[in-house]
Image: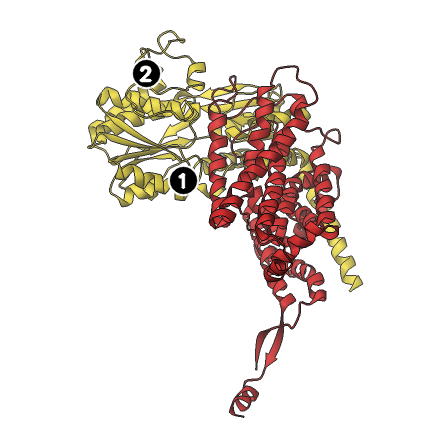
Amino acid sequence: MQLVLEKRAERSGTIALVSPLIAIGLTIVTMVILFAILGKNPLLALHAYFIAPLTDSYSLQEIAVKATPLVMIAIGLSLCYLANAWNIGAEGQFLIGAVAGSWIAVKTQGTDAGAWVLPAMLVLAAAAGALYALIPAICKVRFGASEILTSLMLVYVADLFLDYLVRGPWRDPHGFNFPTTAEFDPVATVPLLIEGGRLHLGSIIALLVVAAVAILLGRTIKGFEIRVVGAAPRAARFGGFNANQLIILTFAVSGALAGLAGIIEVAGPIGHLQPGISPGYGFTAIIVAFLGRLNPLGILIAGLFLALTFIGGEQAQIAMKIPLDVTKVFQGILLFYVLACDSLILYRFKLVFPNRQVTGGAG
Amino acid sequence: MRKSLLALAAGLLLAGSVSAASAADKLKVGFIYLGPIGDLGWTYQHDVGRQALVKELGDKIETTYLENVPEGPDAERSIEQLVRAGNKLIFTTSFGYMDPTLKVAKKYPNVHFEHATGYKRNPNMSTYSAKWYQGRYIQGLIAAKMSKSGVLGYIGSFPIPEVVSGINATMLAAQTINPNIKVKIIWANTWFDPGKEADAAKALIDQGADVIMQHTDSPAAMQIASERGKLAFGQDSEMIKFGPKTQLTSILDTWGPYYIERVKAELAGTWKSEDTWGGLDSHMFAMAPYTNMPDDVKKMAEDAQAAITAGKLHPFKCPIVGQDGKPVECKGGDRLDDGQILGMNFYVKGIDDKLPGK
């Protein structure tokens, strides 16, 4: 007798709904065992991870702040991935957006420029992110270059470009030669929403983006085209959908959203341009996109959940002296279980009895 | 089932209240670390300092640290988390935490902050750093004596003044021994990345360098130099076990005494915002034993160390000629002043490389 995975005739809708819950359940069980081995009270640890951050306004705001760039980038990426266009370079588009928006902030610094500064920064950042994403898209469409490679490689170009600017032309003249621009003026800063906290306008923008993309995918022809091109390329061709045009479109939109996320991060929580503005948001967002099943609402939840594990992990470090590595193990285990459980959507477990197989073969 | 859930809840409450009670009467001291405490370099040494603090004052204080905190938007949250957890004195141990520390400091005027290697201060925010260029000067003397090829290999992290002043101090010293000494510089653009650091060391050795020095935090370069039979200097911590026949010396960050002093001040209620920039004389850092060198080189190094400690020898003594051949203005009388060193943005003559961003 042995246990095998058998392909289902069609995807299981029930499993698709409950698999994230199973995954979270398995993660919690595993973590309880791990905490016990480490000699920590598992219940207190889980409390620090999942409950404590949800109990006060400060932590809730921090979760939103952390989730904002992740959600915004992941929403854009989900459009690409739905259309079978593999944009891996959101990190680069994030950085270029941050650079382009900062250009206005740096150039208007110390002048009495008016309230137009921040909107102009946001628009320029989105445009720059879109243009930057179009490079791999056009290379793909015109020359058949792998967009996975080209978009990824452009991340490093963006990173070094930013580096050059803050060490060279944009360096804060009063900054002892350290690689950073001066603090942005108030007109070039994303406004905070709650006194004393860090929640900023960007989180509202992220919510609007989620809503807009949900409508795009659910209620418009373009959204339908995107889904068909990804799910059934041949059918899409017969339907007269232009796959190349959609690659260009989805790359541009996801680049724009990544760029927007970049400038919001720089003009919001950071307040100036410096190297290391992103702790890998563009890459983490790929995980968020898939964790959210490429669905706008799912991505919002996934982004908030991942942010919760970051904030909770930090509180567990402080409150319980749990090492940071455990937080990382925790996130890894969660992803592992999510992917493992997802395979149950398309496959099911089946018990196979070898001797019956043998007779079957003889007959 | 319901019963066990209730028991769990009760357990949680109980445990929570116990930890709250024991923590209430001790001063909480927090640390923010850039790398993992196991980096065996920068962060490791800060944690050694923290442990010394616990050993000395453990009955009066409780310490907490957050490791691997990136120098970006997360830093501000991490620092604030420590404040919210009740820490009253918080050490943020990397340059990139400067603005986040200042932001949190302004928000919580009753909490005291100590930021390492920065230049922005506040009534409740001190800065502290060490004059490592003094140690680099000693290393430069040794390197020039020990190098057969006359080429030194230097792994830089970021071209910020602290690192640039280290390179210049090394070369000024080396030139007093061998006027034609050369230095190859590779910027790793990271403080801690053993893979990149190892690659940089290999590349430098391939370019003819036979003495490797680094301003990055892991022992990777030491291990490569050891494999290739070259010599190297450790960084931040004692790295001799990674190169018993390789390490010449190492600049050891010794934060313990400073941490103890500041926490004592906090306990006594005498803490105030200060700028501490300590050299060999104030024991903010130390030199590891001089090893793998002949006795005369060792003697020279020890003499130089004594002279610097006594204030008789200054690494940036004028005249200093810049890379462009023009003399550097001497703002400190017979030497460069502290501001010039803290903001150093030029190479001295003899470095045939270009300072990034210049």
Q: Are marks 1 and 2 in contact (CB under 8 Å)?
A: no
Q: Amino acid at mark 2?
A: Asp
Residue with the most extreme top position = B333
| Mark 1 Cα-neighbour bin, 10 Å: few <14, some 14–19, many ≥20 | many
Q: Which of B142 and B221 lies nearest the eye of the viewer?
A: B221
Q: Position of residue B266 (x, y in %)?
A: 60, 25
Q: Position of residue A247 (x, y in %)?
A: 58, 48
Q: Residue at x 67, y 40 (%)?
A: A68
Q: Position of residue A160 (x, y in %)?
A: 46, 34
Q: Colour of chain B?
A: yellow
Separation of marks 1 and 2 at Cα, in angstroms: 33 Å
Q: Between disc 1 and disc 2, whose residue precedes?
A: 1
Disc 1 target residue:
B218
Question: Seen in the image, is B294 located left or right of residue A47?
Answer: left
Q: Residue at x 75, y 49 (%)?
A: B13
Q: Which chain is red?
A: A
Q: Amino acid at mark 1?
A: Ser
Q: Which of B194 and A95 lies nearest the eye of the viewer?
A: A95
Question: Seen in the image, is A360 located left or right of residue A117?
Answer: left
Q: Which of B56 and A347 lies nearest the eye of the viewer?
A: A347
| Mark 2 Cα-neighbour bin, 10 Å: few <14, some 14–19, many ≥20 | few
Q: Residue at x 23, y 33 (%)?
A: B293
Above or below, A218 relative to A199: below
Q: Nearer the viewer, mark 1 or mark 2?
A: 2
Q: Secondary structure at mark 2?
A: loop
The N terminus of chain A - image quarter: bottom right
Residue with the most extreme bottom position = A363
Disc 2 target residue:
B324
Above or below, A29 relative to A57: below
